[in-house]
Image: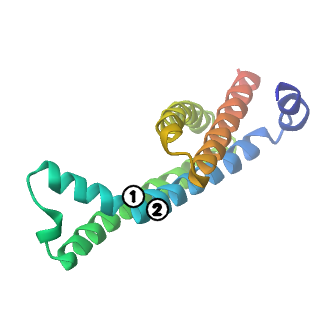
Amino acid sequence: MIQFLNKKLLTEQLHKKTAIICALADIMAILYIKIYWLEIKLTPMIEKILILRGFNPARINKGMLEQMQQLMTQNVLLMFGLFLLWHFIIYIFVYRGSKKALKYVKRYCLITLILSILELLYLVSDINPWSLFALLIAFFYALGYLSSKKRWELLN
């Protein structure tokens, strides 16, 4: 892995590759959240929350459950859409060689890598194809972190 980084990523264009890697990782993470969490896991989660609150989900109108799911889905997608827009602006600055944006991306990739690892620990109990996708996302954030860290070292 280290030899791969030394040979392939340590070029003058490293900041451009960092921006592209991080943008791909963000897109994959949002697809993971939209498809796995919002379309597969959200309805059972809402039903569990209703049970914990003392409601019987079988007695609640299915249309109301669908409206709750749609409202939560729309809010989450709006929030992540704004998040993605903000990060694409940051990635444009990284692509152009901004040191401050690179510093932000380095820290962001480290935090998301840690969160991705925690997500993988959760998915160990429920191994499915999405677990592999989450592992791929963690790999991309690790690559983003390593490349931004190496670029930061070259600049300083």
Mark 1, other Cα within 10 Å: few <14 / some 14–19 / many ≥20: few
- Residue visible at 37% across and 57% down? 79
Q: Secondary structure at mark 2?
A: helix
* Nearer the observer, 51 or 155: 51
Q: Earlier in the sequence, mark 1 or mark 2?
A: 2
Mark 2, other Cα within 10 Å: few <14 / some 14–19 / many ≥20: some
Kindly indicate the quadrant of the structure image that contains residue 12. top right
Q: Nearer the viewer, mark 1 or mark 2?
A: 1
Q: Give residue 19's position: percent from left, percent from top.
A: 67, 47
Kind of residue at badge 2: Lys
Kindly indicate the quadrant of the structure image that contains residue 141. top right
Residue wearing tag 2: 34
Q: Give residue 33's position: percent from left, percent from top.
A: 47, 56
Q: Give residue 40's position: percent from left, percent from top.
A: 43, 62
Q: Is residue 113 left or right of residue 142?
A: left
Gap in angstroms between the C-alphas marked 1 and 2: 10 Å
Q: Is residue 61 left or right of residue 66?
A: left
Q: Is residue 29 above or below residue 156?
A: below
Q: Is residue 107 above or below residue 19?
A: above
Q: Which mark is residue 41?
A: 1
Q: Is residue 123 left or right of residue 147?
A: left
